[in-house]
Amino acid sequence: QAAIGAYPGRLEAAVAAGLRGKLGLREAKPEDPVLIKDFLDLMTANKADFTLTFRRLSDAAGDPAADAEARALFADPSAFDAFAVRWRERLAQEGGDPSARATAMKAVNPAFIPRNHLVEEALSAAAEGDLQPFERLIAVLARPFDDQRDAAEYALPPRPDQVVRATFCGT
């Protein structure tokens, strides 16, 4: 019972630590949960792709000029601006080398994930005897945290015509 009782607090602490890492925050501060929740809510409200947003935020941590790429992922790009000010203020509290922070963030924010539309394309091609899309997808996903410029299209969310509406347990 003691272990079960301790679980919710431990889970919350682990999730908070993971999200702090995704935002480039090394030290826990009392205001972090609000900053994190506000950013996740902002992403949801603006239909910003979770994976791509955190990856672009990694770039912005190393170079504020890269804010434009993260900003562009939001339905209302100006919604990103207020968060960016708060986030940069929080980063400044810790100090440190921006380039090192960006590198650390890229180590926890993958550029590539097995997106449903890409898996579906690979499976459909394989069913027709063409394993090339599958092999390419596997090669890209074998290095999810690496900047693979020749595979940039694998980082993108699906276009409306590529959205997979149903998935299956085996995928």
Image (cartoon, rainbow, N blue to C red):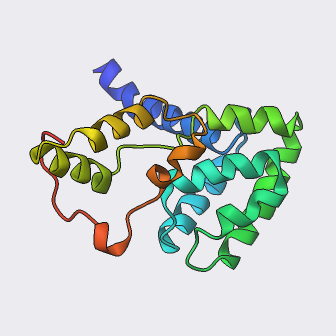
Image position of 12 (left or right of 97): left
Q: Measuring from the top left, give residue 42's x and y in whole percent.
A: 57, 68
- Of the pair 55 and 94, the residue shown nearer to us: 55
Q: Residue at x 54, y 65 (%)?
A: 43
Q: Please state, as top left, top right, bottom left or bottom right, where the N terminus lies in the image.
A: top left
The residue depicted at 83 percent of the width and 50 percent of the height is 63
Vertical arrangement, residue 152 with respect to residue 79, above or below:
above
Residue 127 percent coordinates (x, y): 10, 46
Left or right? Give the position of 159 relative to 87. left
Residue 23: which quarter of the image? top right
The answer to whether residue 22 is above or below residue 44 is: above
Task: Report the label total.
Answer: 0
Report whether 144 appears left or right of 88: left
| 161 or 99: nearer the viewer | 161
On screen, residue 96 versus residue 31, left or right, reads right
**121 w.r.t. 164: above or below:** above
At 60% from the left and 60% from the top, the residue drawn is 39
Is the C terminus in the top left, top right, bottom left or bottom right quadrant? top left
Q: Position of residue 65 (x, y in %)?
A: 83, 59
Q: Residue at x 75, y 61 (%)?
A: 67
